[in-house]
Amino acid sequence: MKVMVCLKQVPDAGEGEAFLQQVGEEVQVACDDWVLNEWDGFAVEAAVHLIEEHGGESMAVSIGDEAVEGVLRRALAMGVDQAWRLQPDSNSADDSMRLAHSLMGAALTWKPDLIICGAMASDSGNGLVPGILAGKLQWPFVALATGLKWDGKSFLVRHEIHQGMESLEKIGAPLVVSAQSGLNQPRYVSIRGIRRVAKREIPMKNMADLSLSPLQNHVELVDLKRRFPPSGAHAEILQGSPQEQISQVIQRMREQGVFTS
């Protein structure tokens, strides 16, 4: 069995300090500490547990620059066999179509039997990538998994469907699953385990390595920008004390018919 698990690096909302900062016209997230997305931790644990129980190989993948190697090393410390860092084909970190396109390339290259993603990203609330990835691969997809087993022929997936109700699905490989919180209890990672993988080389795969061409006919995600309206030529600066300025504002509003009393 081959299991691929997809990871995202997110700001540490519990310990670190995250804030928005302006870089030119763009608004970017700055953070003191980045960690593995909470839901992706359940995905890693599920992948490691399946391989421990049935044999095979697991691989973690994450899209981004060298900074994402931190979460890949955490997955290695938890027991994942290998990791790839995927070079993004866009500057947008939350463009679900582009993310799924890159992950599709990794899947077609490595050929896993099962792909596990976190159900959502804790920083953006985005949970679209697993379903889009399954659609691109034309694989079955089970969302919000709360139980995942292999019986030797098929995957048995228990998942949430509506208002606390759950359903049990029996589906053969290949399969894409999104891991809900409560799927398992991610194992503790010791300092020794982190040190063991600290110098391990993590290969970077670009679009050519994954035999991918740039995504075509795609509606681009517009990044949030901070812009101020241009100052008008007819602006009037009110003079006087705050009370006098308030009286002038009220007078202007009466003159323009905003109110008459």
Image (cartoon, helix red, strand yellow):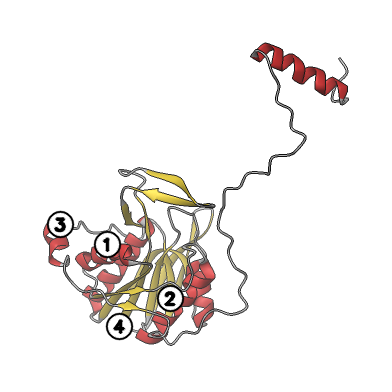
Q: Which residue is mark 1?
A: 70
Q: Nearer the viewer, residue 65 or 192?
A: 65
Snapshot quadrant of residue 106: bottom left
- Res 96 visible: yes
Q: Is disc 3 surrounded by few (<14), some (14 to 19) or many (20+) residues within 10 Å?
A: few
Snapshot quadrant of residue 250: top right
Q: Which residue is mark 4?
A: 1
How far apart marks 1 and 2 lie (CA) works out to: 19 Å
Which residue is painted at 23% across and 59% down in the image? 187
Q: Earlier in the sequence, mark 1 or mark 4?
A: 4
Q: Is disc 2 surrounded by few (<14), some (14 to 19) or many (20+) residues within 10 Å?
A: many
Determine whether label 1 and label 4 are within 8 Å by CB. no
Task: Tell me residue 170's x, y (percent).
Answer: 44, 76
Q: Which residue is mark 2?
A: 103
Quarter of the image where the C terminus is located:
top right
How far apart marks 4 and 2 lie (CA) works out to: 19 Å
Question: Which mark lies nearer to you, 2 or 3?
Answer: 2
Q: What numbered label is drawn on residue 190?
A: 3
Q: Earlier in the sequence, mark 4 or mark 2?
A: 4
Q: What numbered label is drawn on residue 121?
A: none
Task: Tell me residue 227's x, y (percent).
Answer: 61, 47
Q: Is disc 1 surrounded by few (<14), some (14 to 19) or many (20+) residues within 10 Å?
A: some
Snapshot quadrant of residue 116: bottom left
Q: Earlier in the sequence, mark 4 or mark 3?
A: 4
Task: Tell me residue 189's x, y (percent).
Answer: 19, 58
